[in-house]
Amino acid sequence: MEDLLKPDYGVLVLTVCNFLLLVYLLKKFAWDRIISGLEQREKQIADDKKQAQDARAAAENIKRELDEKLAQISDEAAKKMAEAVKMGETQKEQILSAAKEQSERLLEQAKAQIEAEKNKALSDVRGEIARTAVLAASKVVQQQMSEESAKSVVDRVLNEIKAK
């Protein structure tokens, strides 16, 4: 067991020689490829990082533009709604004023028609009274009557008129 704890210098020298030979061979054949691969990988990572930053900036620009367009569209929609409400109010006022004018015109026509009918009725009544008076006078003239007989004639004429 003590032999295990003692160093064997021959094996140690061979191990160091093998290690140095391995380092030399790696440097001669593989070191440049490993370094260039690492540099290429580092460059690829830097390019990917740059592209990600550019894409993020572009996405933020697009988002900002879309937000601005959305705000603009919202403003335009609000303006159009206000215009539509205003136009609706204007049309409502026009319709109401037209209806009021038409009702006033119809009322005036009705008043004129009533006045014409009233005048016609008065004219008819005056004509009827005149006819009645003429008829009564002619009957009174035809008969020399007393006051009582004149009253009876007038009553009879009135009854005839009512019957018509």
Image (spheres, rainbow, N blue to C red):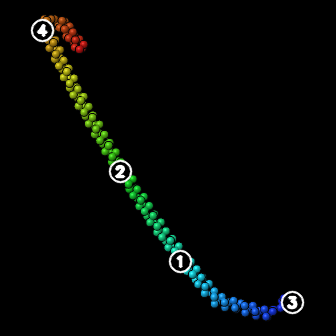
Q: Earlier in the sequence, mark 4 or mark 2?
A: 2
Q: Which residue is mark 1?
A: 47
At a point 20% along the width and 7% down the height, the residue shown is 152
The amino acid type, in three-letter code, at marker 4 is Val
Callout 1 touching callout 3 (CB < 8 Å): no
Q: Which residue is mark 3?
A: 2
Callout 2 touching callout 3 (CB < 8 Å): no
Q: Position of residue 146 (x, y in %)?
A: 16, 5
The amino acid type, in three-letter code, at marker 3 is Glu
The amino acid type, in three-letter code, at marker 2 is Lys
Callout 4 touching callout 2 (CB < 8 Å): no
Q: Earlier in the sequence, mark 1 or mark 3?
A: 3
Question: Is residue 151 among what the camera can see?
Answer: no
Whether residue 9 sits left or right of residue 21 in the image: it is right
Callout 2 touching callout 1 (CB < 8 Å): no
Q: Earlier in the sequence, mark 2 or mark 3?
A: 3
Q: Position of residue 161 (x, y in %)?
A: 22, 14
Q: Which residue is mark 2?
A: 86
Q: Position of residue 93 (x, y in %)?
A: 32, 45
Callout 4 touching callout 3 (CB < 8 Å): no
Mark nearer the viewer, 1 or 4: 1
**Mark 1 element type:** helix
Query: In the picture, residue 29 is in which quadrant?
Result: bottom right
Whether residue 138 sits left or right of residue 34 in the image: it is left
Whether residue 72 sits left or right of residue 100 in the image: it is right
Q: Earlier in the sequence, mark 2 or mark 1?
A: 1
Cα separation, mark 4 vs mark 2, equals 81 Å
Estimate how packed mark 4 is, as few (under 14), some (14 to 19) or many (20 or more) residues with alpha carbons within 10 Å: few
At a point 46% along the width and 69% down the height, the residue shown is 61
Q: Nearer the viewer, residue 129 or 98?
A: 98
